[in-house]
Image (cartoon, helix red, strand yellow):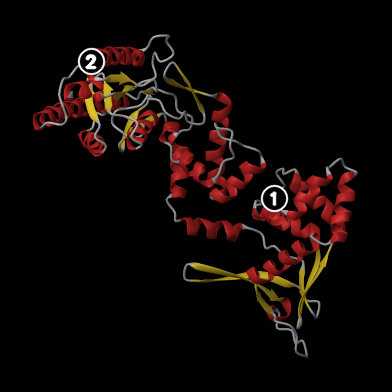
Amino acid sequence: MEKQNRMARRLRCAIYTRKSSEEGLDMEFNSLDAQREACEAYVASQRSEGWTALRDRYDDGGFSGGSLERPALKQLLKDIEDGLIDVVVVYKIDRLSRSLMDFSKLVEVFDRNNVTFVSVTQSFNTTTSMGRLTLNILLSFAQFEREVIGERIRDKFAASRKRGIWMGGFVPFGYDARDRKLIVNVEEAKTVRRIFERFVEVGSATVLVRELRREGTRNKQETVIDKGYLYRLLKNRVYLGEAVHKGAIYKGEHDAIIDKSLWDQVHSILGESPRKRANNTRTEAPALLKGLIFNETGAAMTPTSTKKGAKRYSYYVSMDVLKNRETGEETAPSRLAAGMVEGAVIAEVRRTLQTPEIIRHVEAALKKEGVQKEDATVALRDFQLLWNNLYPAEQARIIQLLVRRVTVTTAGLEVDLRKEGAAGVIREMITPKKLEAAE
């Protein structure tokens, strides 16, 4: 009776298959099918023991055995935890895992759920100490084989890089990949050279990125160029016709896009601290309110700056003070920090552009020029964002178009705006173009 009960017990067998590469998976009968057929035949031979193959398939095509991050394996483990499986059947042990550590985790799951593991071509029983020893020996050789393959690949990669051969991956902007070689893309190469040359001229990644965005320049993935991408491009030695592997530099088999002289100029600038380069850029930028700001007596306030240590401070100073003229009575401050007063003027401009009167005026004026009302509305709303994307010369030009006069009084600032210029400014900001540098 006991023997009949044991024979009558149904053991649900889940067949797991895996193939590292995707090659051949689109064939009518592939490696996964061959593995499953062999496992089904083995399960059928154990029918007298109550073994039955489940219809659910657990196939991982194109997944390495060096990791447990496989969709079919995860589903298999979930079904085991749910009590739906009694036996896991594989063609070879390395189909389930090539890592000794990972396999120990799997065996722990199997033991916790009273699941037996069977390899069709390697006979052992995981419930006995001898079976576990055999399993560990087989896994050790599987992991050893995986590590040896990895070393061979790394050695081949290093040898190829020493010969200057491109080994795949993302194709650099300025090149195309043909027959596993980098070929210069003429149009993109022009852009790369111009980026290097322009960086030497402006000396600032921030300014250059703004220019590239205004011009609509995009990278090989058709996305806008940001500072991170720009720095990676400027530091990529592939443009010198070189190949780099683990810090070592080799002559590449592809053609260079820039020469060594231009590369050295760019990296001489990059060698300076970002703060120093930013200070240089700000020093060369025009004063935002030059010719627009006056005190109560009508005297102009001129831009000036002082340097303390490595830091430069900018101010607007009344000509009354510079020329030692007597004002005769208490007046407004004769010396103002440039950042404070410029920020106040920009805030007033932004506030005025949000008033219903200006919004109606701009929308009506731009409508006559064929600009959609929605575009004008968005530009007015996002003025600050658009403003931040302008380089200093453009910002100074915009202020000259919008501000008639700024008067410093004892009560504060009085900003007289040219409201009629708002439509023209918004039109230019909607359709960015390269503006002439302010004189």
Q: Which residue is mark 2?
A: 48
Do we see residue 153 in this rendering?
Answer: no
Quarter where residue 245 is shown:
top left
Identified by mark 1, the residue type is Ala
Left/right placement of residue 248 relative to residue 190 reads left
Q: Position of residue 3 (x, y in %)?
A: 17, 22
Q: Residue placed at 75% from the left, 50% from the top? A: 379
Identified by mark 2, the residue type is Ser
The residue at the far front in this view is 1
Which numbered disc, 1 or 2, marks the residue that appears first in the sequence? 2
As drawn, the label of residue 30 is none
Above or below residue 339? Residue 276 is above
Left/right placement of residue 377 relative to residue 211 reads right
In this view, the mark in front (1 or 2): 2
Depth check: give the residue in front, 7 or 162: 7
Depth check: give the residue in front, 379 or 210: 379
Depth check: give the residue in front, 369 or 115: 115
Quarter where residue 22 is shown:
top left
Do we see residue 240 in this rendering?
Answer: yes
Q: Position of residue 117 (x, y in %)?
A: 23, 27
Near mark 2 (Cα within 10 A), the count class, few <14, some 14-19 or many ≥20, is few
Q: Position of residue 362 (x, y in %)?
A: 85, 53
Mark 2 secondary-structure assignment: helix
Above or below residue 420? Residue 126 is above
Q: Which residue is mark 1?
A: 437
Near mark 1 (Cα within 10 A), the count class, few <14, some 14-19 or many ≥20, is few
Depth check: give the residue in front, 62 or 261: 62
In three-dimensional space, the C-alpha distance between marks 1 and 2, rounded to whole angstroms, equals 90 Å
The residue at the far top in this view is 28
Quarter where residue 19 is shown:
top left
